[in-house]
Every structure is written in C-alpha cells, then in structure tokens.
C-alpha cells in the first residue's frame, strides 16, 4: 500500500482569478490486489470535516482508517478536500456556490482519473485504462457527489452517504426538537441567513445526531472539544471552514434537479440515526437511474466512520462497487 499526497490545480474552473488547488490523499493498493475492472473511490467529507475523516487514527484504538481498509482489499481510495475546506484553497467562502463545488470537484477527479488510466500518477503503478470511478461522500460530501454527477456526469456510480436527495434534516431526540431544527432553516430559505455562522444552533443536539452512544468517550471528546458546527479549534480530521452555501443543502429539494439527472448506479447509505428522514423514499429521487440501492447500518449515527458498526458500511460499499463494476464489463458469450 502506498500513500500519496497531492495538490490538484483547478484554477481554470474555479474562476476566482487566483490559483485554486485541492488537497488530495491517495491510498494505492498493491497492484496484485486490483480486480479485473479496477475501482477508485473518490471520497469527500462532510461540513466541518476534512479528507482525513477517511483516515481516522486514535491512540489506543484500531480499525478507523477507511481508506486503508479499502486499499487492503484492492480498491484505490482518493480522499479530497473541497474548495473552502481543510487544506484546499479557502478563498472567499461566501462566493463558493453549488456550481463552484461541482465544477472544481469534477476537474480534480478527472485529473486524477486520467493519471490513473495512463499510468502517470505514481512510478511503478500500472496504467488502468478500464478504471471504474465511484463518487462517494459523507453528508455535505454526499451532496457534492450528487451535484457533480448531475452537472458533469463525472462518475460511473455514486454513493451519497448521510444525505438526502429529498430533504436533509438532523435527527433529534423527539419530534418537537426535530421540527424545531428544521424550522431554523426557514430563514435560509427566505434569504435572511447565508451561512452556518449566522444560523441559530442553540438547542440543536449535534451529539445525538452525530454519534451513537457506544462511541468511546476519548474519541467523542477529540471530535467535539473544539466546538461544532463552528469549530474554534480543529482536530486533523476536521475543518475550521465550511463554504457558506452548505446551509442551503439543508433545504427541501436542494439536490432534486441534480439527482434527477443521475443515470448511473446509486448506493444511498445511512446510519440508523441519520440525516435522511425517510431513506426508503430516496430511490424516487433518482428516476433516471436503473439501479438504486438503499442501505441502513444499525447502531450508527450521522458520523459513520466513528460508529462501532462502521465496517459494515465499508463492506457494503466494497461489495456494491464490485457488483456494479462487474456489471459494466462486456458480456462474455
């Protein structure tokens, strides 16, 4: 397994007038483990998190590194910070739109995929002309995957995780709290609030929404000690910045037009307690796709990779990716 850090120039499509780069971490498997149709997962994180969410490490704990898990099984894993997030170019967060996120993500992915297909990404790593690309994201990152596929048809399949193509909403302990949380976004819909910095967070139980009760206390502390969603300090897997347009992703129908254009296979994956209120209804949001799978992981809250059942999700993503990639191979008579 090889780990490669890169910065990918997406200046041309960002159209900010300055150099814009996206930070990327690649986990390359031993080439002998690659399947007949090699698979690459392009993973992007949720709001308030960085690409290192997919490479979690905690002292005294094992088995939290999703990227390494996939690479050990022959899948290329590429984790990407969106513009305005983590170690990518931050810029003016108020000027990052859905279109900016989609266009820059598409440009970044295509550059990496081209290098993998031509064998120019890393010395000694083979060319993979039949590469199968999956756009995967958690929460906001799942939304970015939907936007990118709807507008640019970037991927061969997508796996939006912890996000709804109908209406993303934070789970709460009771119906009154849940309805109150949703109502806070009326000001966003009315154009009175433009970012998470202006949104009212008092009374919203992020701990309940994000983490199941069995998450180890020291891991929970590491995630939440700097505050959320406005982080005053950030762990390595977090991000101090969130593009302001992220609040718009919580509005009803925010992804509807883009999801309706998705024609490739879709895996809608959620925890038992997550931001997709009616997961079985999600298939209807992708009417152009002929292959939509729904997967719900038990004892998992919104932050999937912290859950004790995280490997169930990874295994599902692995098995599903192999299945849809094999289906794309030519029929052998």
Image (spheres, rainbow, N blue to C red):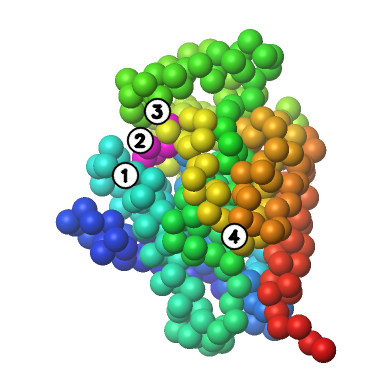
Q: Earlier in the sequence, mark 1 or mark 2?
A: 1
Screen quadrant of the C terminus: bottom right
Left or right of residue 11, residue 211 in this image: right
Say few, some or many: other residues with alpha carbon within 10 Å of mark 2 (under 14 / 14 to 19 / 20 or more).
Answer: many
Screen quadrant of the N terminus: bottom right
Which structural element holds mark 2?
A: helix
Query: Residue sitting at 37 percent across and 37 percent down?
Result: 245
Q: Nearer the viewer, residue 29 or 263?
A: 263
- CB contact under 8 Å: marks 3 and 4: no
- CB contact under 8 Å: marks 2 and 4: no
- CB contact under 8 Å: marks 1 and 2: yes
Which structural element holds mark 1?
A: loop
Residue 114 point in image, percent of width and height: 45, 78
Give the residues drawn in magenta, as a range.
242-247
Q: Residue furthest left?
A: 17
Please, is residue 94 above or below residue 186 in the view? below
Q: Which residue is mark 1?
A: 96
Q: Earlier in the sequence, mark 2 or mark 3?
A: 3
Q: Earlier in the sequence, mark 2 or mark 4?
A: 2
Q: Main secondary structure of the magenta part?
A: helix
Which structural element holds mark 3?
A: loop
Viewer-nearest of labels 3 and 4?
A: 4
Query: Residue sitting at 41 percent across and 72 percent down?
Result: 111
**Residue 6 got which mark?**
none
Q: Which residue is mark 2?
A: 244
- CB contact under 8 Å: marks 2 and 3: yes
Instruction: Using the numbered discs, state the Cα–Cα distance from disc 1 to disc 2 in whole angstroms.
Output: 7 Å
Q: Which residue is mark 4?
A: 263
Q: Earlier in the sequence, mark 4 or mark 1?
A: 1
Q: Earlier in the sequence, mark 3 or mark 1?
A: 1
Say few, some or many: other residues with alpha carbon within 10 Å of mark 1 (under 14 / 14 to 19 / 20 or more).
Answer: many
Q: Which residue is mark 3?
A: 196
């Amino acid at each position: 397994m090889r780990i490669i850090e890169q910065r990918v120039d997406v200046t041309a499509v960002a159209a900010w007038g300055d150099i814009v780069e996206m930070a990327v971490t690649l986990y390359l498997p031993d080439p002998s483990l690659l399947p007949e149709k090699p698979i690459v997962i392009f993973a992007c994180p949720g709001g308030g998190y960085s690409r290192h969410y997919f490479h979690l490490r905690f002292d005294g704990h094992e088995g939290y590194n999703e990227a390494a898990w996939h690479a050990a099984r022959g899948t290329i894993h590429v984790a990407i910070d969106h513009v305005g997030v983590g170690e990518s170019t931050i810029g003016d967060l108020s000027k990052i739109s859905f279109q900016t996120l989609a266009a820059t993500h598409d440009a970044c992915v295509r550059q990496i995929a081209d290098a993998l297909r031509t064998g120019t990404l890393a010395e000694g790593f083979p060319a993979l002309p039949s590469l199968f690309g999956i756009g995967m994201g958690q929460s906001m990152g799942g939304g970015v995957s939907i936007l990118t596929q709807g507008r640019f048809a970037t991927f061969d399949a997508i796996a939006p995780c912890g996000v709804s193509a109908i209406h993303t909403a934070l789970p709460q302990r009771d119906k009154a709290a849940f309805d109150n949380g949703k109502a806070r976004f009326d000001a966003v819909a009315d154009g009175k609030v433009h970012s998470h910095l202006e949104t009212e967070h008092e009374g919203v139980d992020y701990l309940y929404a994000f983490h199941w009760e069995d998450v180890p206390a020291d891991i929970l502390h590491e995630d939440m000690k700097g505050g959320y969603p406005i982080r005053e300090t950030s762990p390595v897997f977090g991000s101090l910045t969130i593009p302001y347009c992220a609040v718009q992703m919580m509005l009803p129908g925010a992804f509807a037009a883009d999801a309706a254009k998705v024609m490739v296979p879709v895996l809608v994956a959620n925890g038992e307690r997550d931001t997709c209120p009616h997961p079985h209804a999600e298939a209807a949001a992708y009417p152009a796709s002929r292959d939509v799978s729904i997967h719900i992981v038990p004892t998992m809250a919104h932050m999937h990779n912290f859950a004790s059942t995280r490997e169930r999700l990874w295994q599902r993503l692995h098995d599903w990716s192999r299945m849809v990639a094999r289906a794309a191979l030519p029929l052998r008579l």
